[in-house]
Image: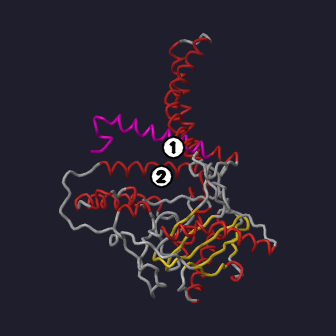
Amino acid sequence: MCWKDSSHALIPRAVRLLVELAFDLRVLGDYLVYRCGLAGSFANSPFPRAFHAVMVVSGTIGLLLALPGIAVFASWLLIHWNLPVVPAVVLGVAAMVGTFYALRRFRRAWMCVNCHQVGSAGRLTGRCIVFYLFFGDNWRVMDQHHAGKALRAACDWLESEGERHSVAVDLVTWPETWCELGCRSLPTRSSVNMFGWHTRQMLSYQCHDAVSHIEELRSELQTEISARLAERGETPASICLVINLPYRDMGLALPVANDLGEDRHLEICLCGWPPSPVVYAHELLHLFGAPDLYLSSHWILTEEGDGDVNVRLREWRELEAGRSEVRAHFGHSVMGSRHAHLETACVDPITARSIGWRDADSTYIEAVVTAERVAERVLAGVANEPDEPDDVSVPTPRTSEKRPRRRRPPPPVQGGEDVADD
């Protein structure tokens, strides 16, 4: 059943309004943290989560009461000024609608403010030093050289895109003896269910042990990088750390956010094997605040589909239809579809705004509106579920996505398991 065609369409529309108002408040809260520089002020404290929950709930209820209150107050004030009742009510309602759309405009302009200009990778301008290291004991010298070339290709492409946007960007990955932090061992990975929904949902790339180990080493890595910068007297505008993992076709960013409980500073991205300039560019942009512009499987797939073949078939059809819809509008972006080469990709207006390359101009707002409409159509398609799915063979999560063929085998993976891709 499609929401728009339902006789009870007011219910989902009201729910959507509540969600939009809650998101407006979240963006406003992140904006205040960003402007006031309060990120990490309450590190390792339960206060931020409780405060955020109370603010969103109470703020949403307050907005629902405040918006009609604006109309009533404005109408009363105009009537008090001897304006006729009908024009006064019309102007009061117009004030309420104007306030609502002003909030929406603000949310669209600052929807990526949660990762805006915070952490070691703030704004992608000026001189940025990209450090990198390898996790795992079996990286050959040839493999390391191949990864370094792919990372350099990604940085060159970002510099050329910055020039296209009239922004000076200098991403430094040389000399190798200075930017490369060597190789480190990984802990033994715990056994995980490669086909289980819980694993896909909670551990995005099924490398929880590696991520936990990296978080434990974050302060040590930050100290080592600070020492190397001090040796050369470097004061770059931004610093990034790329960690190469021996897991196939993966990419994951660990950016810093404008969050009251955020106690991190060094921004890190994880990239798997084989080294790909597209993946490096994609994950580096995440560190500077760029959002994903593709439809992730966890939006559609549910735990129910793991046990019911018909439900899984329906969900994968919805997922493929949704991805086709998103690719039609954002397939050109490096943050959208998977590109074989960077030559076919570009930095779109939403990404450019997120990393500090453009203001919230009309082109950016138009792109955000397009993204909202695409998301609405995708969710409407998900809601329009067929009653009786056809009896067709169902792809499993591992085989439904086409993966590029490797020219040579990757370094041995500790634990004997692969990692799912983005």
Element carrying mark 1: helix
**Looking at the image, residue 290 lies above or below residue 92:** below
Dot 2 or dot 1, earlier in sequence: 1
Element carrying mark 2: helix
**Looking at the image, residue 217 lies above or below residue 40:** below
**Looking at the image, residue 229 lies above or below residue 347:** below
Main structural element of the magenta stretch: helix, strand or loop?
helix
Identify the amino acid type marked 1. Answer: Phe
Q: CA distance from mark 2 to mark 1?
A: 15 Å
Q: Nearer the viewer, residue 356 or 369?
A: 356
Identify the amino acid type marked 2. Answer: Ala
* Horizontal relation, residue 400 to residue 168: left or right: left
Q: Nearer the viewer, residue 108 or 407?
A: 407
Q: Callout 1: 10 Å neighbours few (<14), some, many (20+)?
A: some
Q: Callout 2: 10 Å neighbours few (<14), some, many (20+)?
A: some
Residue 254 x %, y % = 57, 63
Q: Nearer the viewer, residue 215 or 15?
A: 215
User: Which corner quadrant of the image does residue 323 belong to?
Assistant: bottom left
**Scheme of image coloration:** secondary structure
* Horizontal relation, residue 380 to residue 95: left or right: left
Is 11 contained in the magenta span?
yes
Q: Residue at x 76, y 72 (%)?
A: 229
* Horizontal relation, residue 238 to residue 287: left or right: right
> Disc number at residue 23?
1
Is 383 contained in the magenta span?
no
Residue 102 x %, y % = 57, 37
- Give the residue pinned by disc 2: 371
Residue 79 x %, y % = 57, 12
Residues shaded magenta: 1-30
> Disc number at residue 176?
none
